Image (cartoon, grey):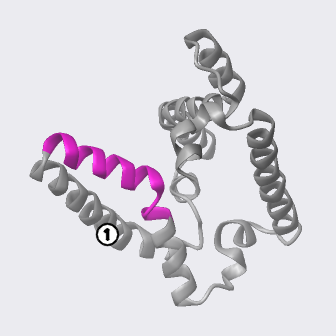
Amino acid sequence: MTRYLAQGVEGSSPILNIGIFAAFVVITLVIVFRASRNTRTASDYYAAGRAFTGPQNGIAISGDYLSAASFLGIAGAIAVSGYDGFLYSIGFLVAWLVALLLVAELLRNTGKFTMGDVLAFRMRQRPVRAAAATSTLAVSFFYLLAQMAGAGILVSLLLGISSTAGQAVVIAVVG
């Protein structure tokens, strides 16, 4: 066991790593495909047909809030900034709760599921939807850029690729 740990990634088989990775991807795609067959309306897509109980919804919200990126980001902020990094995590939680309390109930009362839907209902639809789509894509691009770089580095480690050019190719393929 100690010898295997000492070998690290270099001693592992890239074929085995790719196989395990592919199995996870296939299992995830099967689950998504089976779940998508039950989605017929916007309510089914955004709110699971309103079939969740309160505890189930709480678990889903906490799963969204307590993502790996949040844990790693907060741990890094605390490691770099100390107490200020800890305060950042508390501010993130408080801001999330304020937004939840101020926005969620109003959204639910309108019967809409997104801010874009509410604004398009109240204002001219085409410019509002264009602005919502543009801002979503702009924010998502920068967020996903870091996510894809991290995923590409991870896959390059699984494949045993250590050169910078090889890692760049793997990041591009993963992206």
**The magenta stretch spans residue 160:** no
Residue 112 x %, y %: 59, 67
Can residue 154 be seen from the camera position used here? yes
Residue at x-position 20% and y-position 52%:
88
The secondary structure making up most of the magenta span is: helix
Label 1 belongs to which residue?
Answer: 97
- Which quarter of the figure is the C terminus placed in? top right
Instruction: Please tell me in which quadrant of the rendered image residue 156 appears.
Output: top right
Near-viewer residue (47 or 150): 150
Q: Which residues are magenta?
A: 64-81
Q: Amino acid at mark 1?
A: Leu
- Please count the marks in the image: 1
Residue depicted at 38% across the width and 55% down the height: 71
Q: Quadrant of residue 160?
A: top right
The residue located at (82%, 58%) in the rendering is 27
Decide which of 98, 102 is in the foreground and name it: 98
Which of 58/84 is in front? 84
* For residue 151, above or below residue 54: above
- Residue 82 position, x and y percent, is 13, 48
121 left or right, relative to 69: right
Local packing at callout 1 (Cα closer than 10 Å; few below 14, some 14-19, many 20+) is few
Q: Is residue 80 magenta?
A: yes
The residue drawn where x is 51% and y is 40% is 6
Q: Is residue 42 left or right of residue 39?
A: left
